[in-house]
Amino acid sequence: MSRKTRLANEAKRERAMSENETKIEPCGNMVLLRIVPKDKTAGGLHVPHSAQDRSRAIVLAVGPGRVTDHGERIPVGVQPGDRVLFGNAQGLIVERHSNGLEDVLVNEADILARDKRGEDLQ
């Protein structure tokens, strides 16, 4: 990875962290996600907290990536601002917000897919 690309990635990561008011900086191939539960059905019915789909999130921050046995760093495959799908039971809750959102620290391998649909998660 070139120095210019690395500096751009670091700046993007710092910007996303400051915009989202988080003081957590992931290490290695860890990713900080903000879970965005779906609290209403398509018909407008309210879904109780215990039944909400909690597999959608926004990437807040990413670690620098994992290091191979040969000393090469492999960067994380998602970037701050990406919308992702991940396993419901995965991650460590690091912060709960008063508006019901949670920040979770997960391993990059626990992220199942990028969500490129146009739905607004925030």
Image (spheres, helix red, strand yellow):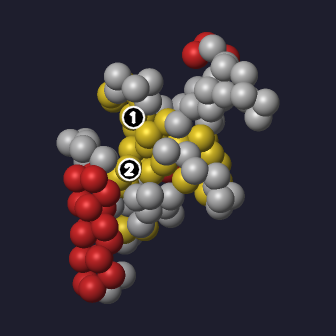
Q: Can residue 18 be seen in the rendering of this structure?
A: yes
The reply, left or right, for residue 49 in relation to residue 97 is right
Identify whether 60 is placed above or below 80: above
Q: For this view, does 80 lie left or right of residue 40? A: left
**Identity, as a three-letter code, of the amino acid under mark 1:** Asp
- Between the residue at mark 2 and the residue at mark 1, the CA separation in whole angstroms equals 9 Å
Residue 60 has which mark?
2
Q: Are marks 2 and 1 in contact (CB under 8 Å)?
A: yes
Q: Secondary structure at mark 1?
A: strand
Q: Is residue 45 above or below residue 110?
A: above
Q: Is residue 85 left or right of residue 13?
A: right
71 in relation to 50, above or below: below
- Whole-percent x, y for residue 9 in the image: 32, 71
Is residue 71 among the parts visible in the rendering?
no
Quadrant of the drawing holding the N terminus: bottom left
Nearest to the observer: residue 81 or residue 85: 81
Q: Which of the pair 24/1 is nearer the observer?
A: 24
Residue located at (40% from left, 26% from top): 99
Residue situated in front as seen by the camera: 97 or 87: 97
Q: Quadrant of residue 102?
A: top left
Q: Amino acid at mark 2?
A: Leu
Picture residue at 50% right of the left edge, 63% below the top: 77
Residue 5 percent location from the top left of the image:
33, 81
Left or right of residue 122: residue 10: left
Task: Please report the residue visible at 68 percent of the width from the left and 58 percent of the height from the top.
Answer: 117
Q: To which residue does mark 1 refer?
A: 103
Q: How far across and down, in percent of the image, does residue 52 sit? A: 64, 23
Determine the residue positioned at 35% across, 52% down: 61
Q: Which mark is residue 117?
A: none
Seen from the viewer's position, the closer of residues 64 and 58 is 58
